[in-house]
Image (cartoon, rainbow, N blue to C red):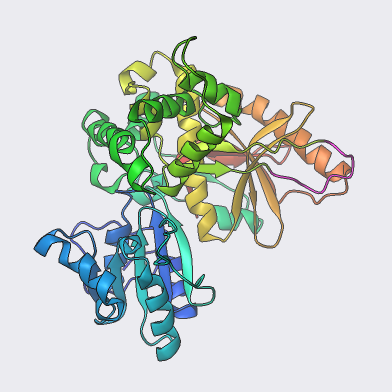
């Protein structure tokens, strides 16, 4: 069905674009018996589930007064009956299904397989109706994100992250993208429903999404009422400081509108941030801690990353046309797009994504650590003129790690927006246009 995976369901939709996560889903169904695909609304979880499923139950189907949800709540075993693999869409609306799936996989010896999709993490309930078991060994959790450029067809996919870790030296021509093209891709975002549309229309989806977060999703996720105005201020603060390790006091200051308004507590801000993470809109990118015996202090604050660049663009009420006049801001939006894509590619090879910053002020935008402990450093630069600056940071990181007793990197790379070729410099640092990358 695709170069990425091996979907085999009977519910595949016309117009479906293959996703990189397919390979992990296929393996998860074989190895665990069930997979749980978690991710933000509209990122394509249902469609990719249908690409594998032979039967389906959607718990958010309003038919019969949300009859499917009522059935799942009253009799979970009935909801699980159907041809395998069986898709249970928005399973968190009936959390008891988790234990039902786990037991069904156990009883059948994985002959009965399931795909669960969810756009939020189910809250713990006082009545004990939340899942009793973790699902370890029976249900594999997979994070799905909006489409990378490789998935939307906007990257040539000639430079593989997996191949780079294996020692392949990149050599590829990038597609002919100008600044206006890059602006369009970032503002359009990776939502499957907007691929192929101009950013002016696609941004309506992102703006609607932001309104929904403020007015409904942040309270619905755990039943705790949150002030939509404060949610809006929080989102604005995070967008203003996107892809940075922002201090809580900075966010508190942004969420306190006037000097006379009572300041929010750090606990309240943390609660709001956790709620955004629970609906998969915000991801925390952790600080990388190499084994450096020099005792250099590593920054422990996470970076807050929006799951798609179209979201901060919508929050800040900007556009491709406006960002053309503010390339400094667009540099951060571009970094958000790069991190989104690298997260997609890294998950496919079971790698983790971090950033690096130490007390001496050295910062590297992205560190990818493979399952075997090998690592790669990446700097994100919009234009080719900044490659030298990124290279300097990468070499400084390599020197600190090696001198501290750590391993040499698998590779170092500057990810750029407007480059024409993927190549290796004479000093061994790679220059990789974003639109050449894939998993």
Q: In this image, 240 relative to 427: left or right?
A: left
Residue 190 visible in this rendered orientation of the protein: no
Q: In this image, 116 relative to 79: left or right?
A: right
Where the N terminus falls, by quadrant? Answer: bottom left
Q: Quadrant of residue 194?
A: top left
What percent of the width, then of the height, locates residue 221?
37, 48
263 in relation to 300, above or below:
above
Secondary structure that dominates the magenta span? loop
185 in relation to 328, above or below:
below
Residue at 54% in and 73% down: 136
Residue at 33% in and 38% down: 213
**Residue at far front of view:** 127
Residue at 40% in and 71% down: 98
318 in relation to 185, above or below:
above
394 in relation to 293, above or below:
above
What percent of the width, then of the height, locates residue 408?
78, 49
As for residue 408 lying within the magenta part, the answer is: no
Q: Quadrant of residue 362?
A: top right
Comparing 22 with 267, the one in front is 267
**Residue at far left of view:** 64
Residue at 80% in and 51% down: 407
State how many labels appear: 0
Q: Which residues are magenta?
A: 288-296
């Amino acid at each position: 069905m695709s170069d990425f995976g091996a979907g085999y369901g009977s519910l595949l939709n016309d117009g479906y674009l293959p996703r990189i996560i397919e390979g992990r889903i296929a393996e998860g169904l074989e190895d665990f018996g069930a997979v749980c695909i978690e991710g933000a609304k509209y990122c394509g979880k249902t469609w990719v589930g249908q690409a594998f499923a032979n039967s389906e139950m959607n718990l958010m189907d309003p038919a019969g007064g949300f009859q499917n949800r009522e059935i799942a709540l009253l009799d979970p075993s009935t909801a699980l009956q159907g041809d395998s693999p069986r898709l249970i869409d928005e399973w968190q609306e009936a959390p008891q299904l988790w234990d039902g799936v786990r037991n069904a996989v156990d009883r059948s010896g994985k002959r009965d397989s399931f795909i669960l999709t969810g756009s939020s993490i189910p809250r713990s309930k006082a009545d004990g109706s939340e899942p009793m078991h973790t699902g370890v060994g029976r249900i594999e959790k997979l994070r799905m994100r909006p489409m990378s450029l490789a998935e939307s067809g906007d990257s040539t996919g000639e430079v593989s992250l997996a191949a780079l870790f294996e020692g392949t030296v990149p050599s590829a021509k990038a597609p002919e993208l100008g600044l206006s093209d890059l602006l369009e891709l970032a503002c359009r975002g990776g939502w499957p429903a907007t691929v192929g549309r101009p950013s002016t229309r696609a941004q309506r989806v992102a703006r609607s999404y932001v309104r929904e977060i403020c007015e409904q999703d942040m309270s619905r996720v755990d039943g705790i009422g949150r002030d939509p105005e404060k949610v809006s201020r929080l989102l604005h603060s995070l967008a203003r400081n996107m892809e940075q390790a922002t201090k809580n006091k900075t966010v508190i200051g942004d969420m306190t509108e006037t000097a006379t308004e009572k300041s929010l507590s750090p606990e309240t801000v943390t609660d709001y941030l956790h709620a955004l993470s629970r609906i998969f809109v915000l991801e925390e990118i952790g600080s990388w801690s190499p084994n450096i015996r020099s005792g250099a202090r590593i920054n422990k604050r996470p970076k807050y990353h929006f799951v798609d660049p179209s979201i901060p663009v919508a929050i800040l009420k900007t556009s491709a046309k406006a960002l053309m006049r503010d390339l400094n801001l667009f540099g951060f939006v571009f970094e958000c797009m790069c991190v989104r894509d690298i997260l997609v590619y890294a998950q496919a090879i079971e790698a983790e994504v971090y950033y690096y910053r130490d007390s001496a002020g050295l910062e590297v935008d992205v560190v990818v650590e493979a399952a075997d402990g090998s690592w790669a450093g990446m700097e994100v630069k919009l234009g080719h003129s900044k490659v030298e600056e990124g290279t300097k940071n990468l070499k400084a990181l390599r020197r600190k790690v090696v001198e501290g007793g750590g391993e040499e990197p698998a590779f170092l790379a500057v990810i750029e927006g407007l480059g024409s070729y993927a190549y290796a410099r004479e000093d061994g640092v790679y220059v990789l246009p974003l639109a050449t990358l894939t998993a």
